[in-house]
Amino acid sequence: MNNTNPLVIILGPTASGKTKLAVRLADFLGAQVISADSRQVFKGMDIGTGKDLSEYHVNDHTVPYHLIDIKEAGEKYNVNEFKDDFYRVFERLTTDGILPILCGGTGMYIHSLLQNQAYTAIPNNEYLREQITSLDIAELRFKLSGYPSQLTEHADLSSHKRLIRAIEVAEYLTENTLVPELRPAISSVIIGLYPDLNLRRSSIIKRLDARLDGLIPEVENLIASGLTEEMLNYYGLEYKFTGAYIKGEYSINELKDRLGIAICQFAKRQMTFFRKMEKDGVVINWFDPHVDDNELFHDVLLCLKSSRTI
């Protein structure tokens, strides 16, 4: 490894083969995988989150992985917790001379590392949120304009959710001084898997069909353990829609159709976020995941070598 604090990042939409590629690279390079998935941190949520832990077992051994199964189902997890957990693992691996490979589809988590946004450390203000959540976008923008410009200059005004967060940040900064936390510099190379749209959709539907029989009892177990409908919705599409099916709101065919469509829409949003990262100056080296596995692997290795990461 020629760069200081090297990091390989593998990102892409759901069902694009990220884990398979990351594990193969890790096995070949003696590296270890760090998950960048907002839901795989939770125990007992394996099928709906696509953990695919069996993929980490190659050549009669298990490739070490991190930030999977570190929280109990029923808990929550946020981007600042992820950053703290990531840097703890990253520094340990780097100190030991082991290349970390960050793999996942949660673009916000990955982007937070590359941009090192200090504002992720600002806690949620539930009281404030209750007061302003009923406001529409125009009203939220007007409220945000009432804060000093230096507290709002980095605000994203594009959505209701982001405006609420921007107001929350501005409100916090009017009464508190945020001291940036010093983090080690990262020398990263980013590998993006960009499947053809039709192939992406077919891969999503094929994977859903293969997992649905196991997903239903997984959600039933979560409900039996005390998870509420609100928490199932918090954990994402698979849990939200399957929970509705268990309540009798959908037939099995309706569950397949509705969930399949929703996951395809989610994959589109993932790609939109990755494109936004590029607009922010993040360089992503895109590859077609549907070529021959060996061809993809060797092309990615060449990319890593040319970047002096390996």
Image: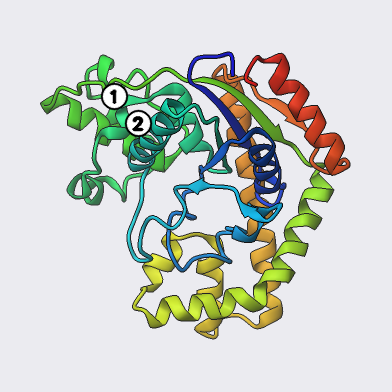
Residue 234 in percent (x, y) is at 42, 60
Q: How is the image coloured?
A: rainbow
Q: Percent from the top left, x then y, of residue 238?
A: 56, 65
Instruction: Name the residue at 71% across, 52% down.
Output: 59
Label 2: few (<14), some (14–19) or many (≥20) C-alpha neighbours in 10 Å: some
When the figure is inspected, residue 88 is found, relative to residue 48, above or below; the finding is: above
Q: Is residue 143 left or right of residue 110?
A: left
Q: Which residue is mark 1?
A: 145
Secondary element at image label 2: helix
Q: Which residue is mark 2?
A: 141
Q: Which mark is residue 309?
A: none
Q: Which quarter shows the N terminus?
A: top right
Residue contact between numbered discs 2 and 1, judged by CB atoms under 8 Å: yes
Residue 54 image point, x, y percent: 64, 60
Tell me the amino acid under the disc marked 2.
Answer: Arg
What amino acid is found at the position of numbered circle 1 in the picture?
Ser
How many angstroms separate mark 2 from mark 1 (CA)?
Answer: 6 Å
Q: Secondary structure at mark 1?
A: loop
Q: Could one spot residue 54 in this view of the protein?
A: yes
Please provide percent x and percent y for residue 252. 67, 81
Label 1 Cα crowd, 10 Å radius (few <14 / some 14-19 / many 20+): few
Which quadrant would the C terminus be assigned to in this image? top right
Image point (43%, 30%), residue name? 112
Q: Residue 173 occupies which quadrant of the picture?
A: top left
Q: Does 199 appear above or below 52?
A: above
